[in-house]
Amino acid sequence: MPKTGKRPPTYRHKGFRFPFHRTLIMGIVNVTPDSFSDGGLFQDPAAAIAHAITQADQGADIIDVGGESSRPGAAPLDVEDELARVIPVILGIVKARPALPVSIDTYKPRVAQAALEAGVAMINDIYGLRDPAMIRLTAKTQAPAVVMHMKGTPQTMQRRPAYKDVVAEVIAFFKERIRTLARHGVNKIILDPGIGFGKSANHNLALLSRLEEIAALGFPVLVGLSRKSFIGMTLGAKLNERETGAAAAHAIAIAKGANIIRVHDVALHRQAAIMADCVRLGKKPIDRRRRGGG
């Protein structure tokens, strides 16, 4: 287990580096008709690939490609349909920008395996690698993997979620996952508290206000706040008015230990991340990254 009190060590996979001396920007590419904020915009593979390239040009370090919506109430997608959506996009991004790491947003082992074979360098699993087949795949390939906390499923998660102490319960979940995955040889994990996944607005705010307790586990922490409904509830803002509030919250999350932020508007959030990093360090962080490589 990585030592606490320090920035997490650099992860490496397939020649890619994921350094955590500065905040990494993960750009979102939803190849879906029904995602809550951009469903249908990038369902065409050419449009999705072009969007990923634009995000890379704006400073994205990682592109996260997903084919199944995880919005509240979303229905599960058949494996073959998910593969048909994401694999052409992954292949197109890898061909256009071979130095840009791509992540696959899926909880299905078959989709993750096909995506890894197509060139992705990271798995992003909203179910937190609870499927034994996903654990075996991650152990075999040694790909970095995002382990997210979610109470329930996308179909049920927002039906009055309740916790005695949301931060303590999320940390307990992560400790169990860390122990279990380590026994199977999976150590390159990234912790995602799952903002908006089975949490009320107050639960989300509590997780952000105590994020340093999750960072103290010693692993990289990913936070995704872009366009989330709790920001709209907090600010009284419509869907297309939430990015400034999200950027402010991301900056606070970085100060409290976040290492990756998952965003729709790369340019805006990259500026917030650079400023947060400079304040956190008291200086401008050294950035020797290749395009997308860290």
Image (cartoon, helix red, strand yellow):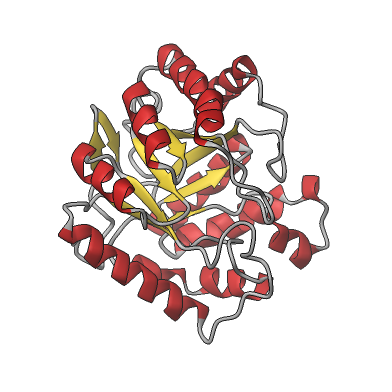
In the rendered image, residue 226, in percent from the top left (x then y), is placed at 63, 49
The correct choice, above or below, for 194 with respect to 100 in the image is below
Whether residue 164 is visible to the viewer of this picture, yes or no, is yes
Query: Does residue 96 appear left or right of residue 9 in this picture?
Result: right
Taking the view exactly as shown, the residue that stands out farthest to the bottom is 164
Q: Quick one: 121 or 209, which is closer to the camera? A: 121
Q: Quick one: 197 or 77, which is closer to the camera? A: 77
Query: Does residue 119 appear left or right of residue 66 in this picture?
Result: left
Q: In which quarter of the view is residue 168 placed?
A: bottom left
Q: In which quarter of the view is residue 252 placed?
A: bottom right
The correct choice, above or below, for 71 with respect to 170 in the image is above
Q: In which quarter of the view is residue 108 placed?
A: top left
Whether residue 20 is visible to the viewer of this picture, yes or no, is no
Query: Does residue 216 appear left or right of residue 275 in this picture?
Result: left
Quadrant (top left/top right/bottom left/bottom right) for the C terminus: top left
The correct choice, above or below, for 71 with respect to 150 in the image is above
Quadrant (top left/top right/bottom left/bottom right) for the N terminus: bottom left
In the rendered image, residue 182, in percent from the top left (x then y), is placed at 19, 59
Identified at 61% across, 65% down, the residue is 157
Total labels drawn:
0
Identified at 44% across, 65% down, the residue is 256
In the rendered image, residue 149, in percent from the top left (x then y), is placed at 46, 63
Q: Quick one: 259 or 286, which is closer to the camera? A: 259
The correct choice, above or below, for 89 with respect to 231 in the image is above
Q: Quick one: 294 or 185, which is closer to the camera? A: 185
